[in-house]
Image: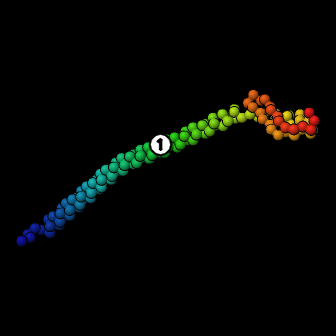
Amino acid sequence: MLNLLPPKQKKELRLNLLNQTITIFGIAVILAFLTLALLLLVVQAFLDINLKGVESDLFSQQAKKEAREIDDLERKIKNLNKELVFLDSIQKEKNTFSLLLEDSAEDIPYGVQVKNFSINKSRQVNLRGLAITR
């Protein structure tokens, strides 16, 4: 191939070729950055969607945990209420005979030996025993 162009045109052709190469390279770099930015936006959107899903799962798990804790507390309260009702029924059925026994013991004279002491629910006292004198 013969190169018959003057040096000034050769220089202009080289500069044009260099300009085209730099322009193509610049466009390629810009396209690469735009592609990378687009890819990063897609990844960010994907991560945001996943984050929202994880957050909703976390909230639902916390709600389930709180519901289980509330159920456990309600069950404990019901058991305590049953125990309190039971204790109240025992307390209502309880007879305080200790004061009656104390009063009866003070009324028994000296020399009387008590063999049997009974109290019924209507607070009647029956004493049986022996006395030196009638």
Instruction: Identify which residue, 19 or 127, lies in the foreground.
Output: 127
x, y (%) of residue 116?
80, 38
Three-letter amino acid code at the position of disc 1: Ala
In which quadrant will I find the C terminus? top right
Q: Taking 43 as reference, is 28 left or right?
A: left
Instruction: Identify which residue, 6 or 1, lies in the foreground.
Output: 1
Image quarter of residue 27: bottom left
x, y (%) of residue 121?
73, 30
Evaluate whether residue 74 shows in this view: yes
In which quadrant will I find the N terminus? bottom left
In the rendered view, would you say 109 is above or below 11? Answer: above
In the rendered view, would you say 27 is above or below 131? Answer: below
Q: Residues within 10 Å of mark 1 (few under 14, many from 20)?
A: few
| Residue that label 1 marks | 63
Evaluate whether residue 59 shows in this view: no
In the rendered view, would you say 69 is above or below 95? Answer: below
Q: For the point 66% across and 37% down, which residue is it?
A: 87
SS of the residue under disc 1: helix
Q: For the point 17% across and 63% down, which residue is it?
A: 17
Instruction: Identify which residue, 8 or 41, lies in the foreground.
Output: 41
Image quarter of residue 74: top right
In the rendered view, would you say 15 is above or below 130? Answer: below
Instruction: Identify which residue, 119 or 61, lies in the foreground.
Output: 119
Q: Taking 77 as reference, is 104 left or right?
A: right
x, y (%) of residue 31?
25, 55
x, y (%) of residue 95?
74, 34
Image quarter of residue 9: bottom left
Q: For the point 33% across and 49% down, which residue is it?
A: 46
Residue furthest to the top:
122
Q: For the point 27% across and 54% down, which residue is it?
A: 35
